[in-house]
Amino acid sequence: MSAESIKVRQGAVFQGEISVPGDKSISHRAVLLAALSNGACRISNFLEGEDCRRTLGIIERLGVKIERVGEGDIVVHGCRGIFSPPEGDLDCGNSGTSMRLLSGLLAAQPFSSRMVGDGSLSKRPMKRVIEPLTRMGAQFHTEGEGGRPPLRVTGGSLRAISYETPVASAQVKSAILFAGLFAEGITTVTEPAASRDHTERMMQYFLVKLRREELGEGKSRRFGPVRVTLAGRQAVESRDFRVPGDVSSAAFWLIAAGARPGSRLLVKGVGLNPTRTGILAVLVRMGVRIREVVEMGESGEPVGLLEARGGPLRGTVIEGAEIANVIDELPVIAIAGALAEGETIIRDAAELRVKETDRIAAITANLRAMGARVEERPDGMVITGGQPLKGATLPSFGDHRIAMAFAIAGLFASGQTVIEDAACVNVSHPGFEEILRIFQKGGNYPRHSVPVFSGAGHLHHAARP
Ligand code: S3P
């Protein structure tokens, strides 16, 4: 467990290599699909963070047998999605992914369950999953204002729907696809821009047949609208699954190295799914040299190695369909913006206001407290970079990504930066502080003995949608 507060001082030129814990989005889904399967599935490199443990605990409460083999190593005994009614509330803690994805599964169960969350989750919108799942035949009751949790789901037999999501949200898409697996008929979900496609990949890996079609055109096709089609009542075949490292956790370190000329970082065993690697294109536009080497497709997900070489940063614009691809990285991209010459503009990102906290307000307040120039906009912000950052005592707003983004800012600030209430980093990145200490002292390669990296890779191009 990390300390209550994180203290950080100016870092040095960095030379070294790290690996990051398992991917949060993929760990949630691995447990859920394994539970729907017809046998035992061993999941390795499972993220032992707070959020994924909530999903695991809830699945266990629903009658699924879980064996804990070791750290990040579990066996889930699939029950073909036939769960037992839980006693008492299902506590999702801080995890929006748990509540929204489980809504899709519970919608098909012939019993009633009540999901609750912490103060932050109790303020997050659930109507986005309630609307489609109600159309499929489930009943929902929210106790919070305007469709906020606690959330009671009464499930039953479902009918397939064809649904267009108003926001590009992988959580909404996944909830519908999970429910669609239980429904009679063909379920179709269309999203306005491509959100992460882990559910689709993992369903296919567990031998579920589905079709994912990119509906956009030209160069921006992979960021454009997507339609997914799935027939209900398919068997989910049990399989072992290895979770790749989380590229969203790697993003903090890519920026910590990338914003300092002379630094060089290798990240090994990291997930390189193209619906998640928009951060690389953003960093290249900002002046970081990035090399991406896909080494293998593990469990249906591309995995490999990233190299970042630091340079002087310049501002960039992040907008439109690219936003869904970098939604979780925007807090630390804002830090890069503050360290860059010129303006960094983030727009079309109003979704940031309904994350673990209002991230637009939190980033603006904390950047200003460090002396940065930033203008808050309803759907983003404009950062005029290049102002020297000064150390400050900052709130985390109970949000793991805000805590980590500002710890990274502290590596570039004069004096000491203190992130208060920072235990929340364990939501997605256990071990964050240990890597921060390595950065603080300049790396983990002995001086002058940096291994020469000769992997056949390609330089990432600054492709923009
Ligand atoms: C997630 C999807 C994203 C992301 C969240 C994890 C997922 O949320 O911000 O951290 O695992 O599906 P939305 O689907 O709400 O955009």
Image: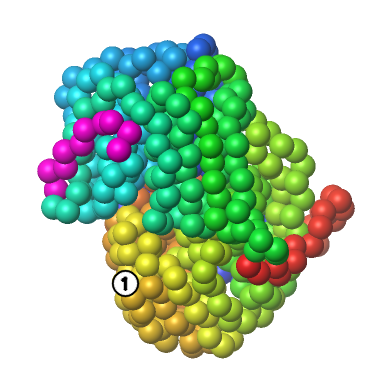
Is residue 229 in the magenta section? no
Tell me where residue 433 appears, x and y as whole percent.
47, 53
From the viewer's side, name the closer residue of 122 and 53: 122
Q: Is residue 139 magenta?
A: yes
Q: Is residue 452 visible?
A: yes
Q: Secondary structure at mark 1?
A: helix
Per the rendered image, the range of residues in magenta is 135-144
Q: Give the quarter of the figure containing the N terminus.
A: top left
Residue for badge 1: 361
The residue under the point 54% across, 72% down is 318
Q: Residues within 10 Å of mark 1 (few under 14, many from 20)?
A: some
Give the quadrant of residue 376. Answer: bottom left
Residue 82 higher or lower than 371, as above or below: above
Q: Which colour scheme appears in the figure?
A: rainbow
Eyeballing the image, is 316 above or below 437?
below
Residue 391 makes an appearance in the image: no
Query: On the picture, is 341 further left or further right than 450?
Result: left
Residue 281, percent from left and from top = 66, 65
Tell me what residue is drawn at x 16 percent, y 38 percent. Answer: 141
173 vs 239, nearest the viewer: 173
Q: Residue at x 52, y 71 (%)?
A: 319
Q: Nearer the viewer, residue 38 or 178?
A: 178
Q: What residue appears at the point 84 percent right and 50 percent down from the top-left corner?
A: 455
Percent x, y for residue 233?
A: 46, 20
* Quadrant in the picture for residue 159: top left
| Quadrant location, the C terminus | bottom right
Q: Amino acid at mark 1?
A: Ala
